[in-house]
Image (cartoon, rainbow, N blue to C red):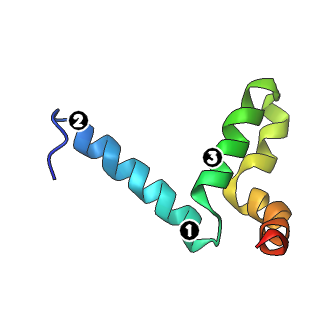
Amino acid sequence: MFFGEAGAGERGAILYTVIESYRRRGIDPYAYLKDVLTRLPSMTNRKTVGLLPANWGQMHIPDLKAAA
């Protein structure tokens, strides 16, 4: 329940909220973050729209279901 630092609890809550929002969209948080964080450094600002969870999910959820 305690994170050690006053601001750490708030950062943890933000992270948990983001991860749960991915799950509600049917996106595996690990697969999403792994893909986005590896592709992001080589992308331009205009290409990052495809990395938004809704856009990413439309492109990758059929692939993830086929692999399961």
What amino acid is found at the position of numbered circle 1 in the picture?
Answer: Arg
Residue to which mark 3 is pinned: 33
Rendering quarter of residue 23:
bottom right
Q: Position of residue 26 (x, y in %)?
A: 64, 72
What residue is at 25 percent from the left and 37 percent from the top? 8
In the displayed structure, 4 sits above or below 61; it is above
38 w.r.t. 68: above or below: above
Question: Label 3 sits on what residue type?
Answer: Leu
Disc 1 marks which residue?
A: 23
Q: CA distance from mark 2 to mark 3?
A: 23 Å
Q: Quadrant of the C terminus?
A: bottom right
Q: Secondary structure at mark 2?
A: loop
Q: Which mark is residue 61?
A: none
> In this view of the protein, which residue sits in the foreground, 7 or 26?
26
Left or right, 13 with respect to 57, comes to left
What is the CA distance from the residue labelled 1 to the residue labelled 3? 12 Å
User: Which circle's residue, 1 or 3, is located before the other in the chain?
Assistant: 1
Q: Is residue 46 above or below residue 51?
A: above
